[in-house]
Image: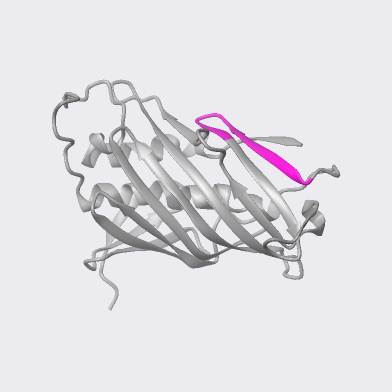
């Protein structure tokens, strides 16, 4: 069973990319005006640029994560696909189980546990088409979620992680107890740890349209989960 969804990223993408490019176009790979030859050393990213990468993934978490609990299908199949189209394109796969991890295959309405993942070699692709700064961002996901059908609305608690890649830059991210509700784009709890270019930073979700990001050296940012925009913030006291 394959469902198709035209991602909200189509409308948000310009708002998301422009502030980031102003502080470092090289954070976006594949740019046509890239002056770095293949034999040259890849320029190091700043903490601000890596924070913006984490912002993309935090925003994606609010788009991809809810499918763990929102996905429905009128079918007796036990393995499903969900397709995103538009500026974010690609397919995620969902396997539902009853009895938790390692349980019995089940349909979405019967399940209390789900694996959501991208297939090997088939990441979600974000295409950036700004003239002179064209490029792509590749995201993989491997989520495992406990489903709470007794909650109102239904909730999923996600663990797992994935990878971020753009041009010569790569990073990884890990979810720890990220809670998403049916019908909401904003995770209500949990953290995501983003590791890239020598930086480690933690994103904390609290249920509204912003998330807090804190780097290992104490630098703080706020992420707008609707646009992905990252703003430097005061360090929490």
Horizontal and vertical percent for residue 207? 53, 65
Q: Is residue 69 left or right of residue 135?
A: right
Which residue is nearer to you in this view: 229 or 117?
Answer: 117
Within the magenta stretch, is there residue 85? yes
Specify the segment rendered in magenta.
78-90
The number of callouts visible is 0
User: In the image, residue 71 lies at what x, y percent?
Assistant: 71, 48
The image position of residue 57, as x and y in percent, is: 43, 49
Left or right placement of residue 182 versus residue 220 in this view: right
Along the line of sight, which residue is nearer the eye, 5 or 105?
A: 105
- Residue 228 visible, this angle: no
**Residue in the image at 62% along x and 60% along y:** 145
The structure residue drawn at horizontal position 28% and vertical position 35%, both measured from the top left corner, is 168
- Residue at the limit of the structure toward the bottom, as seen here: 237
Viewport quadrant of the N terminus: top right
Magenta region includes residue 125: no
Q: Residue furthest front?
A: 102
Q: Where is residue 96 in the image (x, y as percent from the top left)?
A: 73, 53
Q: Main secondary structure of the magenta part?
A: strand
| Residue 134 appearing in the image | yes
**Residue 202 vertical position relative to residue 117 in the rendered view, above or below:** below
Q: Quadrant of the C terminus?
A: bottom left
Image color mode? one colour
Q: Is residue 48 left or right of residue 146?
A: left
Q: In which quarter of the image is residue 156?
A: bottom right
Seen in the image, is 150 located left or right of residue 47? right
* Residue at image coords 21%, 25%: 34
Q: Residue at horizontal 54%, vertical 50%?
A: 142
């Amino acid at each position: 069973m394959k469902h198709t969804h035209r991602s909200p990223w189509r409308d948000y993408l310009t708002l998301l990319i422009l502030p980031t490019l102003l502080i470092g176009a090289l954070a976006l790979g594949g740019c046509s005006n890239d002056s770095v030859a293949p034999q040259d050393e890849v320029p190091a990213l700043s903490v601000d640029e890596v924070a913006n990468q984490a912002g993309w993934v935090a925003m994606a978490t609010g788009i991809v994560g809810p499918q763990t609990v929102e996905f429905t299908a009128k079918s007796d199949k036990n393995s499903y696909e969900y397709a995103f189209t538009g500026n974010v394109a690609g397919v995620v796969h969902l396997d539902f189980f009853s009895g938790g991890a390692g349980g019995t295959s089940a349909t979405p309405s019967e399940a209390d546990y789900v694996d959501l993942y991208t297939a090997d070699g088939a990441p979600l692709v974000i295409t950036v088409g700004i003239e002179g700064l064209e490029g792509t961002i590749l995201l993989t996901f491997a989520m495992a979620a406990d489903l709470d059908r007794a909650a109102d609305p239904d909730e999923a608690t996600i663990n797992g992680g994935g990878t971020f890649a753009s041009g010569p830059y790569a990073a990884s991210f890990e979810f720890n107890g990220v809670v998403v509700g049916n019908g909401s784009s904003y995770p209500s709890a949990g953290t995501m740890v983003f590791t890239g270019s020598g930086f480690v930073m933690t994103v904390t979700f609290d249920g509204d349209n912003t998330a807090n990001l804190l780097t290992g050296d104490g630098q703080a940012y706020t992420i707008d989960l609707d646009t992905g925009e990252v703003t430097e913030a005061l360090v929490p006291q």
